Image (tube, helix red, strand yellow):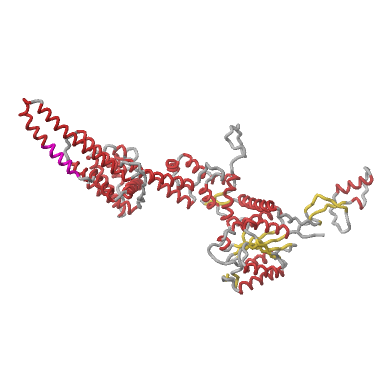
Amino acid sequence: MSSYKYYRWDGTQSPFGSDDEGLFDRLSEELMAHGDLRRALRSLYFRGPGSPDDERASGLRDMLEHLQQAKREKLQQYDLDSVMDDIRERLKDVVDTERSGIERRVEEAREQLATSPEQQDDLAGPMKILEGRATRNLDALDQLPENSAGAVKQLNDYEFMDPDAARKFKELMDMLRQRMAHDLFRGMKDQLENISPEQTQSLTEMLKALNQMLRDKAEGNTPDFDGFMDEFGGMFGDNPPNSLDELLQRLTQSMAALGSLMASMSDEQRRELLELTEAALGKEALQLLANLASQLARMMPIPANDYPFTGNDPLDLQQAMGLMDQLQDMGSLERSLQQTIRSGNLDDLDPEQVEELLGEDARNDLDAMKDIERQLEEAGIAKRDGERLQLTPAAIRKLAQKALKEVFADIKKDKAGGHEVRRKGVFGESEGVTKKLEFGDDLDINLYRTLFNSIMRQGPQVPIRMEVQDFEVDQTEHLSQAATALLLDQSRSMGMFGNWQAAKKVAMALYWLVKSAFPRDQLYIIGFSDYAVEITGDELPSSMWNAWVSGTNMHHALAMARELLSKHKVATRQILMITDGEPTAHIEEGQSYFSYPPSYRTIDETLREVKRCTRAGISINTFMLETTSFLMDFVDRMARINRGRAFYATADKLGRYVLVDYLNGRRKKVA
């Protein structure tokens, strides 16, 4: 048994339940066009889960546009050429500090010598040594290359005289080592904050071990990941990789960021940065890094992008590497969004990445989209067949009802009335009106009116004596049972020229009209392109136009309709055909023969089938969605043979013609 819980309304709950109807309405047009629930959901995810007036609900398209805009803003904000400027400024500060320190130290020594005449003999030797060293150091500073990397290499072997200059150079080298190592090995931040030359050697040993594991993997051997982690796992701190694949994924992302930085630089800057890396980590480490990048590129392509920066804001190396990380993450999310737009699979998106790069609102919108399938299942609109999500029979009914409502709404707007043709008769639908019994009327006596007439004539007494003049009978509208075949053109032109969706909507509306209002009627739906095939009501939502094979085989469609309608001995048998082109195919010996322009054989065979339908008492009404002279001439020949009618309708007005004609055509006029 079902159980229910009731809560006091606090103003936040929706008093009318969830927006299942609105959600279905937003899906219906796509479902009508394609009949594929997954495709309709993909389109809904692209547009956004909210209603058209709800600007807060973003879809995948909005997320992609916002991400691309944020990426453009960063590229338009920063100047990548300034990256080396920071290093040059810091090097210049080191040299200036050393130069001024040397000069200050020599000057201080000279002042001390001048103020201590008694110590001149003792200080003369050290003073000479100091001046000689100062001269050599100043000459070395004067001869430093203008290239930052060359200057760093020479300063690596330089003996500083000024402690502040020595400290600043050490900080610069530590920054270079830490930046390069940290950006290559994410998750090792604590261990690489103040990396020393000794730790650089440990990093070199780790690079050797990594290269060996990649060689083992490439050769089909089992890499010793556990041994690697036993020796170097401590370098990863609290965030060690759990597998070689995870480690390689991290390395690939890091290499991509560094590769993007290099690719975005000029040739001169790139060469300078590589030389700085060699000076910071050593030649052996640089070679090992090159080998590692080469092996990784063979195993998993590294998407290193060339970013065209056009802004003016300066960047140092640390900021540039952080910006590259951001741009790489944006690129990764952009690819995931594009893949999700193509596949409709929201699991391709990382919610945390969406929130980090696009904000909390985007994360909420993604969660709302992921909840749509659950809503559809709970509302009875969708059900699962294994992994496949498909429409339920209830959803198909709702689609048909919506189509019928829209078609009759159009009829109402245009005031296309006149399809109610009333005749008096029997065994039909009561009109709520009675009449005096006349000779020839069926004895469908209205007892209430008959007794009332008797009492009014003789007064209130029993027994009631009835006369012929007292009898009244119910007046009814006599409706005949009808058998209809709707021929639905599924040829390629119907889809290419935008007629398919309107035709399919009319078919669904007619299907539901017959099913709900005239259940005794029989409706067959036959789709035709190169061949004709019967389409059931359940299959109608998923039916599509034929995008692959050419042909408009009216011959086969008419023959199939005649065979199906011949089983019904009813007053009205009719064919309603919706098409946008003349017949271009016919059946011979069970095979379809196509010819464009239409062959005389195809025209003759199709008109012969029209004659067979006419002899069987089946009327053919044709609704043309194009007005080519050839099609109009052919339909005119059909009408002369069959005495049926021909209509020309645009796609948006097709429904009102077909349904009005159906309602007219099914009524039998009874005197």
Query: In the image shown, does 97 or 616 lie closer to the viewer?
Result: 97
Closer to the camera, 67 or 439?
67
**Residue 132 x, y percent position in the rendering:** 10, 37
In the image, is residue 134 part of the stretch drawn in magenta?
Answer: yes
Question: Horizontally, is 499 left or right of 361 in the view?
Answer: right
The image position of residue 45, as x and y in percent, is: 51, 48
Which secondary structure class fits the magenta region best?
Answer: helix
Q: In which quarter of the image is residue 188?
A: top left
Residue 639 shows up from this direction: yes
Q: Can residue 559 be seen in this view?
A: no
The count of marks equals 0
Residue 142 lies left or right of residue 484; in this view the side is: left
Q: Which part of the image, by quadrant, shows the N terminus? A: top right
Residue 134 lies in quadrant: top left
The residue range painted magenta reads 132-144
Residue ranking furthest to the left: 121
In this view, 31 is above or below 610: above
Quick check: 241 above or below 445? above
Residue 561 is a magenta residue: no
Residue 486: image location, x then y, percent: 65, 61
Rendered location of residue 124, percent (x, y):
7, 31
Farthest residue, direction bottom: 600
In the rendered image, the vertical position of residue 666 relative to residue 348, given as above or below: below
- Residue depicted at x 20% and y 45%: 145
Left-right relation of 115 to 2: left
Q: In which quarter of the image is the C terminus?
A: bottom right
Where is residue 173, by image quadrant? top left
